[in-house]
Image (cartoon, grey):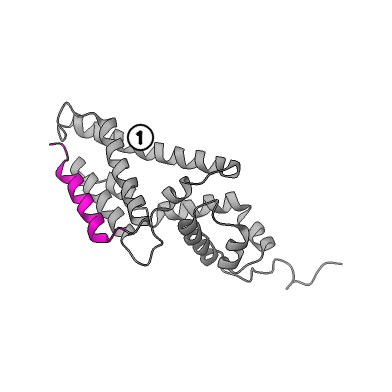
């Protein structure tokens, strides 16, 4: 005997989008290993079977939360790459990072940096994924700066790889300092200093 029509395909009793946002904010505050399944189910307002059914395991949930983070709060990176000059790329990126880090509505620091500080065997796949993400970001900046050198927008002697690594180091340093309590004004001062030392 088939179950009643109302029982088949019953809609979830929670909003997956809102639940994913709660997971994102929790991972952002506590890092990957610092966030337990009990923390997640409490914050998302669901039980473990519902979490597994909707998002998979903890690692799969983190990957979905990270995608949401990169396309939302951290979208300034892709936006910066579209700027017409290398200096404007750096300026747009740094301003976006300062705005995100200095927004009191956001958890402190950067989700990518917070999660990268995880330790232990459980977090190895996450560390590897985040390392690949950071490498991809640095590579994208290096290619953008190499095009700027070729176009004469940056001095001919500029090393695109070094400049990309420098900018990423400033961005990640800002995130660590923000997590430690640096004010938006102080973060902005660091970003301004980085731009004052920009080549050309």
Quadrant of the image containing the N terminus:
bottom right
Residue at the left extreme of this rendering: 200
- The answer to whether residue 181 of the structure is visible from this angle is yes
Q: Residue at x 16, y 41 (%)?
A: 197
Q: Give the percent coordinates (x, y) of residue 51.
A: 63, 60
So how many labels did they put on this image?
Answer: 1
Q: Is residue 12 left or right of residue 173?
A: right
Question: Toward the viewer: 3 or 127?
Answer: 127
Q: Give the percent coordinates (x, y) of residue 46.
A: 63, 67
Q: Is residue 182 above or below residue 9?
A: above
Residue at the right extreme of this rendering: 1
Q: Is residue 138 above or below residue 19?
A: above
User: Does the magenta portion include 67?
Assistant: no
Question: Toward the viewer: 19 or 81?
Answer: 19
Q: Residue at x 51, y 64 (%)?
A: 22
Residue placed under numbered mark 1 in the picture: 139
Which stretch did the figure color magenta?
Answer: 182-200
Neighbour class for label 1 at 10 Å: few (<14), some, many (≥20)?
A: some
- The answer to whether residue 85 of the structure is visible from this angle is no
Q: Is residue 57 left or right of residue 22?
A: right
Quadrant of the image containing the C terminus:
top left
Residue at the front extreme of this rendering: 180
Question: Toward the viewer: 93 or 10?
Answer: 93
Q: Give the percent coordinates (x, y) of residue 176.
A: 36, 50
Decide whether the magenta segment is chiefly helix, strand or loop: helix
Q: Give the percent coordinates (x, y) of residue 49.
A: 69, 61
Q: Residue at x 38, y 55 (%)?
A: 109
The part of the image, by quadrant, that contains residue 143 is top left
User: Does the magenta portion include 193?
Assistant: yes
């Amino acid at each position: 005997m088939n179950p009643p029509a109302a029982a088949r395909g019953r809609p979830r009793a929670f909003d997956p989008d809102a639940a994913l946002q709660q997971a994102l904010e929790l991972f952002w505050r506590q890092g990957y290993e610092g966030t337990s399944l009990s923390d997640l189910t409490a914050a998302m307002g669901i039980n473990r079977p519902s979490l597994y059914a909707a998002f998979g395991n903890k690692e799969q949930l983190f990957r979905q939360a990270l995608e949401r983070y990169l396309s939302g709060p951290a979208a300034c990176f892709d936006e910066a790459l579209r700027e017409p000059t290398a200096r404007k790329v750096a300026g747009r990126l740094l301003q976006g990072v300062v705005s995100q880090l200095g927004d009191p509505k956001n958890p402190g620091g950067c989700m990518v940096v917070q999660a990268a500080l995880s330790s232990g065997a459980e977090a190895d796949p996450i560390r590897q994924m985040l390392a690949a993400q950071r490498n991809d970001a640095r590579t994208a900046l290096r290619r953008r700066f190499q095009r700027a050198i070729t176009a004469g927008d940056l001095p001919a002697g500029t090393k695109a790889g070094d400049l990309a690594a420098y900018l990423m180091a400033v961005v990640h340093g800002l995130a660590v300092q923000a997590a430690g309590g640096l004010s938006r004004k102080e973060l902005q001062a660091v970003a301004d200093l980085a731009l004052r030392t920009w080549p050309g």
